[in-house]
Image: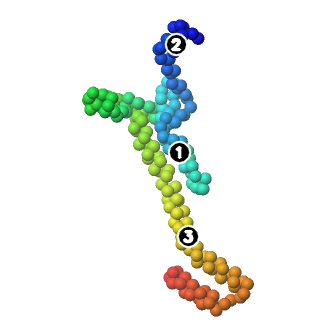
């Protein structure tokens, strides 16, 4: 390659051509992250969306995922992208035109089509449905841990008392403590 080679795009000062995006038939993440995101793929030249969510916690006994929504044919024209104020002289007019064109595209959508905003709503519903039992489980665990922490002192005292009873026999204060504990437990069970 020489600088005088006019056929070479970079040497001539022209920007190199942008390669066309690969349209894979495999599902690829286009928004979000693997735990909660929107995937897309191309099948016979048509773009398809689905939302996926999963729980990535080995301790959880319930379904960890991934869980997928129904597949929807993409209708990207039905999404009105927000206009940055600095990019246009009259951003409100440009936003209005985008909203109108998106509304027209949405009016022609079939029931199995979805725009990116629809998929975001589907993803939110899917994530909430999946996370509700997990969050309940986490709250139960937190309550259990807090209760175990609150009762740690008394449990250690009882363990010490039992080891003393095994080693030295029953002491009068232990008998009193056990009777008081029985009375307390009887009151709780009624």
Q: Position of residue 42 (x, y in %)?
A: 51, 28
Whether residue 44 is situated above or below residue 49 in the rendered picture: above
* Image point (54%, 62%), residue name: 141
Residue corresponding to mark 3: 149
Helix, strand or loop for disc 3: helix
Q: Position of residue 143 (x, y in %)?
A: 51, 66
Give the distance between the C-alpha atoms of the residues marked 2 and 3, in whole angstroms: 71 Å
Q: Nearer the viewer, residue 176 or 77?
A: 176
Q: Nearer the viewer, residue 153 or 145?
A: 153
* Image point (42%, 41%), residue name: 120
Q: Earlier in the sequence, mark 2 or mark 3?
A: 2
Q: Is residue 165 visible?
A: yes
Q: Is residue 99 visible?
A: no
Whether residue 146 is situated above or below residue 138 in the rendered picture: below
Residue corresponding to mark 1: 35
Helix, strand or loop for disc 2: helix
Residue corresponding to mark 2: 11
Residue most toward the right? 167
Helix, strand or loop for disc 1: loop
* Image point (41%, 30%), residue name: 76
């Amino acid at each position: 390659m020489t600088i005088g080679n006019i056929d070479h795009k970079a040497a001539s000062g022209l920007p190199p051509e942008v390669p066309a995006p690969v349209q894979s038939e495999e599902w690829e993440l286009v928004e979000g992250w693997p735990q909660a995101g929107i995937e897309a793929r191309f099948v016979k030249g048509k773009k398809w969306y689905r939302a996926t969510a999963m729980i990535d916690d080995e301790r959880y006994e319930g379904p960890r995922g991934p869980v997928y929504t129904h597949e929807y044919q993409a209708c990207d024209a039905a999404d009105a992208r927000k206009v940055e104020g600095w990019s246009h002289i009259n951003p409100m007019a440009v936003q209005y035109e985008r909203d109108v064109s998106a509304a027209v595209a949405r009016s022609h959508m079939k029931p199995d089509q979805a725009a990116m905003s629809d998929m975001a709503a589907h993803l939110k519903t899917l994530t909430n449905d999946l996370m509700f039992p997990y969050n309940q489980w986490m709250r139960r665990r937190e309550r259990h841990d807090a209760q175990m922490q609150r009762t740690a002192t008394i449990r250690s005292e009882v363990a010490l008392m039992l080891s003393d009873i095994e080693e030295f026999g029953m002491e009068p204060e232990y008998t009193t403590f056990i009777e008081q504990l029985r009375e307390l437990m009887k009151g709780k069970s009624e």
